[in-house]
Image (cartoon, helix red, strand yellow):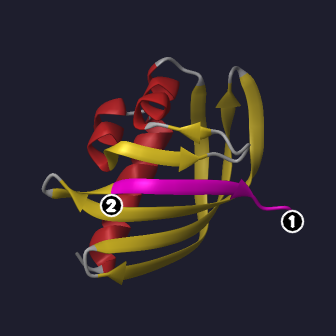
Amino acid sequence: MDEQGIRALKERLKEAMTKSDVTALGALLAGDLGFVGAAAKVWSKADDLNGHRYGMQRIERLDVQEQIVRVYGTFAVTVTRAAITGTFGGAPFAGSLRYTRTWGEVEGSWKVVAAQCGLVAF
């Protein structure tokens, strides 16, 4: 996998997130995914998919402001800053988040194996 391939996967992930497309998300997330959210809660793949499936989280806008992609042979790391709006648990939210994702080849395709996001203060 090269940088352009990872960027294409990230674009598919963004589209799946904004459409709450659990089929596409399921294909892009590793089965043993660990995602640390902005409130430091650890989410599994099932948690993430169910949040989209049942409407707990809806992302209405996700505008990428910065993006770094580094490929290290069998894995890649991406660091992204994005302006995001949507709802969580029915309550609206808006903010700037920074995501770090680790991508790796799992079961013959590249998937997110670990991720973390945090709020950007200013």
Q: Amino acid at mark 2?
A: Leu
Total marks shown come to: 2
Near mark 1 (Cα within 10 A), the count class, few <14, some 14-19 or many ≥20, is few
Residue shown at the point (59%, 29%) measured from the top left: 57
Q: Between residue 55 and residue 60, name the one nearer to us.
A: 55
Residues shaded magenta? 112-121
Q: Main secondary structure of the magenta part?
A: strand
Asked if marks 2 and 1 touch (Cβ < 8 Å), the reply is: no
Name the disc covering residue 122, or none. 1
Q: Is residue 119 magenta?
A: yes
Q: Quadrant of the C terminus?
A: bottom right
Near mark 2 (Cα within 10 A), the count class, few <14, some 14-19 or many ≥20, is some
Q: Between residue 67 and residue 1, name the one nearer to us.
A: 1
Tag 1 secondary structure: loop
Q: Between residue 21 and residue 79, name the one nearer to us.
A: 79
Q: Quadrant of residue 120?
A: bottom right
Q: Amino acid at mark 1?
A: Phe
Q: Quadrant of the N terminus?
A: bottom left
Q: Quadrant of residue 10?
A: bottom left
Name the disc covering residue 9, or none. 2
Residue shown at the point (57%, 67%) measured from the top left: 80
Image x and y of residue 27, in percent: 26, 43
Q: Is residue 110 magenta?
A: no
Image x and y of residue 104, in percent: 30, 64
Toward the right, the furthest residue is 122
Name the disc covering residue 57, or none. none
Image x and y of residue 51, in percent: 52, 26
35 horizontally vs 95: left or right: left
107 horizontally vs 60: left or right: left
Image height check: is 117 above or below 39?
below
60 horizontally vs 19: left or right: right
